[in-house]
């Protein structure tokens, strides 16, 4: 069988593996959240709070969707015309056009150009956050964080680009197989490394100070049978007033992180409810699930790019001879951008199902639906969340159930539990 035949077979196997993993690991059924309860919950929220949140979200939309459209157009312009290939050549010219210069510097130049062209939309977002009082970051702090983000992306991108194009040169007929394995391995590696090495670049993390709240949280984790390395507090208040918490890392790097803003804004019982939600993610191995599906998706993408990239019309549009050469990197970016756009609703749906399961875990673990509902009200108020967003936007991009859905789920749980 030819390498292309093996690639087709591998692609089918990866698609099947991803489908099986999604069916088995993703909670496709969700706790009840009757629409009648959602409407009742919405009616109980302060009218001015709901109006203010919707005004804020409306102000964000032009920048958000403008960035999406601009990023896609830039990717298509560079990838489906010879412009991208010429940019890669130009970046490598000071180094004699050596393939490593084209691969690393050319690839980073393509990404940087796209970032710079969408930078005005990022500034738009920051101006809206500042105007509505959600950002505590000055423009200088925002710029520093932006530069940090570029630097981290450049390091990771340079390693990935050098590794990828080294493989294409050493194994010109089978690079897709080694590339798929490498992409999957990189996803797994980053799941371990990002919490330890990258997150501290943007926030300072300190162990939650000893006291009744920490004691309760650690006891709850032990009662839940979830091994948690630590409960950390992030100094999020230096850039935002938003409240949040999350679980990150795998195995020995797993930790629950709460924003210092959450500790200031919420009651201890509400903080406990939020952490119970995060323990649900750890209990159900959601980080592992995300890592596994991400690794399979990355491997699948490499194989699909190999197969699609050998299509003559695409290569002629991009002005390249092979998808495996550094000059074709803009074409790969264009294909990935289109795939990401198509996959966005499915990714959002999976995320909402996972988050709804974590909500159900929090309700069962604390047995306190009233506090859970109160916390959802607080989250919506402080974070200026639209409690019942437009349906099209919800289906397209919402990573969590809406505020009224979560409140309705708490009410349904209370009725079922007789509370």
Image: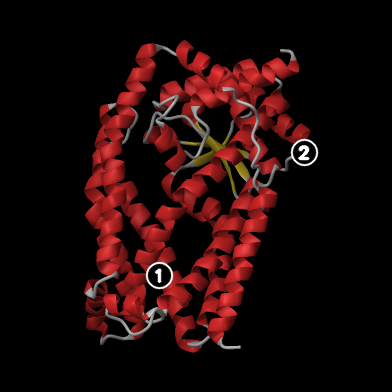
Q: Which mark is residue 158?
A: 1
Indicate the quadrant where residue 65 lies: top left
- Of helix, strand and loop, which one carries label 2? loop
What mark, if any, has residue 225 been given in the picture?
2
Percent from the top left, x then y, of residue 16? 64, 63
Of residues 362 and 47, which is closer to you in this image?
47
Position of 152 with respect to 105 (left or right) is right
Residue, x 38% and y 19% (percent of image)? 50
Q: CA distance from mark 2 to mark 1?
A: 40 Å
* Quadrant of the rendered image containing residue 116: bottom left
Where, quadrant-wise, is the C terminus in this rendering? top right
Residue 309 % position (x, y) = 41, 76
Q: Are marks 2 and 1 in contact (CB under 8 Å)?
A: no
Viewport quadrant of the N terminus: bottom right
Colour mapping? secondary structure
Q: Position of residue 79 (x, y in %)?
A: 30, 69
Q: Residue at x 52, y 73 (%)?
A: 303
- Label 1, secondary structure: give it: helix
User: For this rendering, which residue is in front, 409 or 314?
Assistant: 314
Residue at the image position 67 percent from the left and 37 percent from the top: 280
The number of numbered discs placed on residues in the rendered structure image is 2
Residue 112 shows in the view? no
Category of crowding for the residue at label 1, using alpha-carbon neighbours closer than 10 angstroms: few (below 14), some (14–19), many (at least 20): some
Q: Is residue 37 above or below residue 312?
A: above
Q: Nearer the viewer, residue 342 or 371?
A: 342
- Residue 102 versus residue 231: which sits nearer the camera? 102
Query: Residue 357 placed where, x, y %?
Result: 64, 36
31 sits left or right of 386 in the view: right
Numbered circle sitting on residue 218: none
Whichever of labels 2 and 1 marks the residue nearer the N terminus, that label is 1
56 versus 106 height, above or below = above
């Amino acid at each position: 069988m030819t390498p292309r035949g093996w690639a087709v077979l591998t692609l089918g196997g990866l698609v099947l593996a991803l489908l099986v993993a999604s069916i088995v690991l993703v909670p496709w059924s969700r706790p009840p959240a009757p629409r009648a309860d959602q409407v009742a919950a919405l009616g109980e929220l302060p009218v001015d709070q709901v109006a203010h949140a919707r005004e804020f979200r409306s102000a964000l939309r032009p920048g958000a969707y403008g960035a999406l459209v601009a990023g896609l157009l830039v990717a298509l312009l560079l990838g489906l015309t010879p412009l991208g290939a010429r940019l890669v050549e130009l970046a490598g010219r000071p180094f004699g056009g050596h393939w490593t210069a084209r691969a690393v510097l050319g690839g980073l130049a393509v990404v940087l150009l796209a970032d710079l062209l969408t930078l005005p939309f990022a500034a738009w977002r920051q101006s809206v956050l500042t105007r509505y009082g959600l950002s505590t970051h000055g423009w200088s702090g925002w710029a520093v964080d932006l530069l940090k983000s570029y630097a981290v992306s450049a390091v990771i991108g340079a390693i990935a680009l050098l590794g990828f194009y080294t493989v294409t040169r050493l194994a010109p007929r089978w690079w897709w197989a080694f590339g798929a394995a490498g992409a999957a391995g990189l996803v797994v590696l980053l799941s371990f490394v990002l919490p330890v090495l990258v997150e501290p670049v943007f926030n300072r993390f300190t162990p939650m100070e000893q006291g009744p709240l920490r004691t309760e949280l650690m006891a709850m984790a032990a009662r839940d049978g979830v091994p948690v390395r630590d409960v950390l507090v992030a100094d999020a208040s230096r850039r935002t007033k938003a409240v949040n918490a999350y679980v990150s890392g795998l195995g020995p790097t797993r930790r629950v992180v709460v924003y210092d803003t959450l500790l200031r804004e919420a009651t201890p019982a509400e903080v406990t409810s939020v952490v119970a939600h995060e323990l649900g993610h750890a209990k159900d191995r959601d980080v592992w699930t995300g890592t596994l599906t991400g690794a399979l998706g990355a491997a699948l993408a490499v194989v699909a790019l190999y197969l699609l990239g050998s299509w003559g019309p695409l290569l002629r549009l991009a002005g390249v001879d092979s998808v495996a050469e550094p000059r074709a990197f803009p074409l790969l970016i264009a294909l990935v951008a289109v795939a990401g756009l198509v996959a966005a609703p499915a990714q959002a749906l999976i995320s909402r199902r996972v988050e709804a399961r974590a909500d159900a875990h929090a309700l069962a673990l604390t047995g306190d639906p009233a506090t859970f509902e109160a916390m959802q009200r607080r989250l919506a108020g402080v974070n200026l969340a639209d409690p019942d967003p437009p349906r099209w936007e919800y289906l397209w991009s919402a990573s969590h159930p809406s505020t009224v859905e979560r409140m309705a789920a708490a009410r349904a749980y209370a009725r079922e539990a007789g509370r």
